[in-house]
Image (cartoon, rainbow, N blue to C red):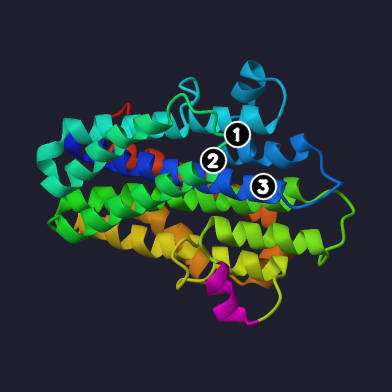
Amino acid sequence: MLSRTADHLYWMARYIERAENMARVLDVTYNMSLVPNAAQSEAALWQPAVEIAGNTELFEKNYGEYTAANVIQYMSMDDANPSSIYNSLRSARENARAVRVAMSSETWENINTLWLEFSQFIGIRLVESGLSVFCDWVKSRSHLFRGVSFGTMLRDDAFRFVRLGTFIERADNTARLLDVKYHLLLPEGEEVGGAVDYYEWSAVLHSVSAFQAYQKVFSDTIVPWRVAELLVLRGDMPRSLLACYDEITIILGQLSGRQNNECRRLAGELHAKLRYARMRDIFQDGLHEFLEDFIVSNNKLGGEIQRTYLNVHGG
């Protein structure tokens, strides 16, 4: 496969996954803002959403204040924000159009229709009406993309690069979400286990579609360390870090064949760390440090994938 084609497919999948992740964060933040909590200001509620996206400097430069209206506009429709839902879906469609012959016609039609339908939301003040509808639409279209591509594409390298992009992006977002929750959402000195604390952790689980999974696995009240275990070390939880790397290592093995390149080495190292880790040890050494190290390592792997298989510039 041409590296240019692989590049477009990989980034197409990453951008669609990114749009879904931004919609999940916006939706859960909005729902949390409806829970009475006098201890948290509007800025304290909405700043973590921008922290998860990793673009705080750009936001503060262009908007200044962390208000609901500003954050929703920035993360959904701002064309100056490279990670906004608008830019992510536009970039996904541009990448798909460049290599439409490399995917099934159903996959291309799905992405093209997604972009055409997106126009219905442009110009609407989502903060006043329709944010939940908008976020649900983004999530459902992302699910439809994955279902159509999984159900119609030949299991060749094109399919593998689509899947690889999805899991690299998903792992990054899950780690960021969990890290920001532990270090920004909880005010200093707050007791773990309070009513608001329960709603916040429920919201985190809902943001990664893991609330029912948590109840099935633990059959207990929601506690932070078990949420972390579910989202980091459980291979049967689809959006966990381990589940992502279970897939990534298989895909890289298929792409490289018998060659042991740097991509496989980096992925295998990170996979082993997740597979054999214990939550107790992670907490003793510091969950923040563990997640920060994971995000750096995941980005390093992304860079190595770019150099090994794709165009140098990417996206």
Q: Residue furthest right?
A: 189
The reply, left or right, for residue 92 in relation to residue 208 is left
Up-down: is 197 above or below 23? Answer: below
Contact between labelled residues 2 and 1, with CB atoms less than 8 Å apart: yes
Q: Which residues are magenta?
A: 211-219
Q: Residue furthest front?
A: 129
Mark 3 highlights which residue? Answer: 180
Up-down: is 250 above or below 220? Answer: above
Give the residue drawn at x 26%, y 48%. Answer: 162
Give the residue drawn at x 45%, y 59%. Answer: 269
Query: Residue 131 shows which numbered tag?
Result: 2
Q: Nearer the viewer, residue 284 or 99?
A: 99
The reply, left or right, for residue 85 in relation to residue 45 is left
Q: Residue furthest left?
A: 101
Residue 32 highlighted magenta (yes or no): no
Crowding at mark 2 (Cα within 10 Å: few <14, some 14-19, many 20+) = many
Kind of residue indicated by mark 3: Val
Q: Residue furthest bottom?
A: 219
Chain-order first, disc 3 or disc 2: 2
- Residue 215 falls in image quadrant: bottom right
Secondary structure found at label 1: loop
Contact between labelled residues 2 and 3, with CB atoms less than 8 Å apart: no
Give the residue drawn at x 60%, y 50%. Answer: 28
Q: CA distance from mark 3 to mark 2?
A: 22 Å
Quadrant where the N terminus lies?
top left
Majority SS type along the magenta span: helix
Query: Residue 282 shows which numbered tag?
Result: none
Mark 1 highlights which residue? Answer: 127
